[in-house]
Image (cartoon, coloured by chain):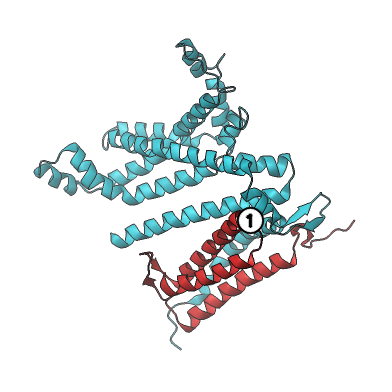
Amino acid sequence: MNKLSNQRAWLFVVPVVLLVAFNALIPLMTVVNYSVQETFGNNQFFWHGVGWFEQVLKSERFHASLLRQLAFTTMILLIEVPLGIAVALCMPRKGPWVSVCLVLMALPLLIPWNVVGAMWNIFALPDIGLLGKMINGLGIDYNFTQQPVAAWVTTVLMDVWHWTSLVVLLTYAGLCSIPDAYYQAARIDGASGWAVFRFIQLPKLNRVLTIAILLRFMDSFMIYTEPFVLTGGGPGNTTTFLSIDLVKIALGQFDLGPAAAMSLIYFMVVLLVCWIFYTAMMRNEGQS
Amino acid sequence: MSASFGLQWMAWTGPTIGFFVFVAASIALMGLWEKLQPGGAPRRGILGIDTTRGDRLFITYLGSGFIHLAWLGFLGSFLWGALIVSVIYAVIVFRWV
């Protein structure tokens, strides 16, 4: 028999398989089991079929939170990606300011999510917060605890503040990896700044930007802590995103069946988007 | 106290056991297929992407999940129809994607 490699290396994978089984597969299987049953506690379950899925799919509450989630994710992607690229382009590539800029950019990423929520809550309060008081001082009526638009603006601003740095750092790393020869060739051809960006930098950033968009999509699509601490999903339900709604159903109302069905639908949407991004990345790789 | 290190807390049911056994069996079958015909049969299909047998199985499962959800949302809880559509979809994916 022609053995190509030492198969014993597979044994090293066993710990990972066990870990994934315990922290992902078993909980996921449990969620699938819960999604087809009804429980009133005391570990007693009653068969309910696909009723919960049907209920969730037809629930206006689910549609509304899914729509809010998609709107939020689209908004922050539309702001953070161009802004991140712009900031990365402005950052120095050489000299002492490089480390200063990098540290400043990394700072928001180091702050725990609940702290970010609490910070922005205090920062934006209309009566004592620096931002809230200032906006009101300018004559604009702003109160994120009562006005839906103000709550949305504050939530989006908070996310942009917290996560644009990630796009900046990834883009900056991508920009630094472009060899000087490309810029020299562009100079010889007399290319404008826009042409350099469009035909050298942007194509070279393709892969890193795909990863940045994927990471930002995933994070923002599963966002929970920051808006929960900032607005608690309010005023009313206006900033109740999917994960906040899910926790309300699962832990607030203890409706495990509908919550399990909702999380599986949520999981499938995330899986689909991940697969689309993965396919796009692999396609780019194939072309390059 | 009915102390147990059992799996009651996972609330297993017959149909969900059947579902997971089917998934595990299909993955095992893919392993067997790979053993018989190594290489994963990579090709570029109608989606314009390179896929192996494993990719095609994943696309089948993900698509079937959405077919069932769509059926449930638009047509109701008689899911045998969705299952038939999913099988047709699986054949299409394994043949042309």
Residue that mark 1 sits on: A23
Q: Closest to the observer: A65 or A205?
A: A65
Q: Which chain letter goes with mark 1?
A: A
Residue sticking out furthest to the front: B75
Task: Tell me if A11 is positioned left or right of A287 in this view.
Answer: right
Q: Quadrant location of the C terminus of chain A?
A: bottom left
Residue sticking out furthest to the bottom: A1
Identified at 72% across, 55% down, the residue is A34
Identified at 81% across, 54% down, the residue is A43
Q: Position of residue A250 (x, y in %)?
A: 70, 44
Q: Closest to the observer: A268 or A225?
A: A268
Identify whether A51 is placed above or below A190. below
Task: Tell me if A221 is positioned left or right of A169 in this view.
Answer: right
Number of labels in the image equals: 1
Q: Residues within 10 Å of mark 1 (few under 14, many from 20)?
A: few
Q: Position of residue A17 (x, y in %)?
A: 59, 64
Identified at 25% across, 45% down, the residue is A201
Secondary-structure class at tag 1: helix
Q: Colour of chain B?
A: red
State which quadrant residue B43 falls in.
Answer: bottom left
Identify whether A206 is placed above or below B7. above
Q: Closest to the observer: A25 or A4?
A: A25
Q: Position of residue B42 (x, y in %)?
A: 39, 73
Q: Position of residue A10 (x, y in %)?
A: 53, 71
Task: Tell me if A134 is positioned left or right of B48 in this view.
Answer: right
Identify whether B25 is placed above or below A28. below
Q: Colour of chain A?
A: cyan
User: Residue flagged by tag 1: what amino acid is it?
Assistant: Asn
Q: Closest to the observer: A47 or A213?
A: A47
